Image (cartoon, rainbow, N blue to C red):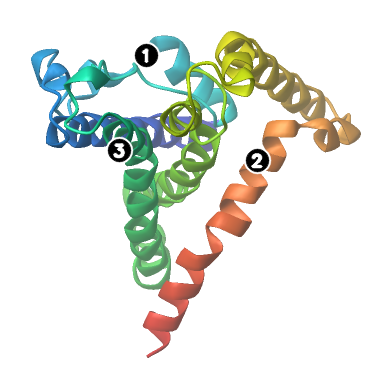
Amino acid sequence: MLDNIIFYVASIAAVIFVLCPHEWGHAFVATKCGDGTPKAYGRLTLNPIKHLDPVGFICCALVGFGWAKPVPINPNNFRNYRRGLFLTAVAGVVVNYIVAFFVYLLFVLFVRFAFVQMATINLFLSYLADFLYYFLLNVYSFSLAVFVFNLLPLYPLDGFRVVESLTRQVNPVRRFLRNYGQMILIILIVESFICDVLVDFGIDWAGNCDILGYVMYFATHIIGYPIQAAWGWILAL
């Protein structure tokens, strides 16, 4: 029971650690591109209270996919409209990948040199070791999941903003993604949650139907591979 509590507390802390830098990245790059709107709304900060969206936070904590409050921007203020929109759109996921890169190193070092030692000293340090293990692992995996998830070209995700920056307003694909993207996104999240519940009840085949589950696998095993390979090579020197 206590192990489960530690896991969920670590997961919640990891969600906050992942989502807030993501939104700060949007705000920082938008400001650098000439738009003062994020700063005016108090979003040029790492303060979780300014960034967390209750529904998105709960979804991320439950199924590993979620969102924070979108950073308000005015693209008309950008010195270069298309470039500013594109850079602002990808800034959040770039920050997530950077976080995943360095947190993976901390996770490996912790497991190699501290986890076992802490777990064998006393009960308190054993629980703390479990918390740090789950926290670092979840920050890494959630960062990669948010990276991939937010690049899906569905409104209001960052991937749609990338499409928006590269296409004209009359583009039919862009209009479809703008009009129906949110509905598709909600369906995918609900479908993933239902599949997880069915698997918990012993219906194993439901896991094969989890579309966002495949996105998570792609994030951790494919997108995360360069990070693991890079640190594996560096630490082997």
Q: Report the front residue among 124 and 149.
A: 149
Pointer 2: residues within 10 angstroms few (<14), some, or many (20+)? some
Q: Label 1 to label 3, Cα distance in Å?
A: 27 Å
The residue under the point 76% across, 32% down is 210
Pointer 3: residues within 10 angstroms few (<14), some, or many (20+)? some
What amino acid does circle 1 point to? Asp
The residue under the point 21% across, 30% down is 30
Check disc 2 and report the residue beneath it: 215
User: Which is more N-terminal, label 3 or label 1?
Assistant: 1
What amino acid does circle 3 point to? Arg
Above or below — where is 156 with respect to 116? above
Check disc 1 and report the residue beneath it: 53
User: Which is more N-terminal, label 2 or label 3?
Assistant: 3
Above or below — where is 150 with respect to 216? above
Q: Could you say whether the residue bearing mark 3 is in a helix, strand or loop?
A: helix
Which is closer to the viewer, label 3 or label 2?
A: 3
Q: Could you say whether the residue bearing mark 2 is in a helix, strand or loop?
A: helix
Are circles 2 and 1 on residues that touch, CB within 8 Å? no
User: Which is more N-terminal, label 1 or label 2?
Assistant: 1
Q: Position of residue 195 (x, y in %)?
A: 77, 25
Above or below — where is 232 with respect to 199? below
Which is closer to the viewer, label 2 or label 1?
A: 2
Q: Label 3 to label 2, Cα distance in Å?
A: 28 Å
- From the viewer's perspective, tell me whether residue 153 is left or right of residue 9: right
- From the viewer's perspective, tell me whether residue 188 is left or right of residue 47: right
- Find residue 96 and report its image quarter: top left
Q: Label 2 to label 1, Cα distance in Å?
A: 22 Å
What amino acid does circle 2 point to? Val
Check disc 3 and report the residue beneath it: 83
- From the viewer's perspective, tell me whether residue 24 is left or right of residue 190: left
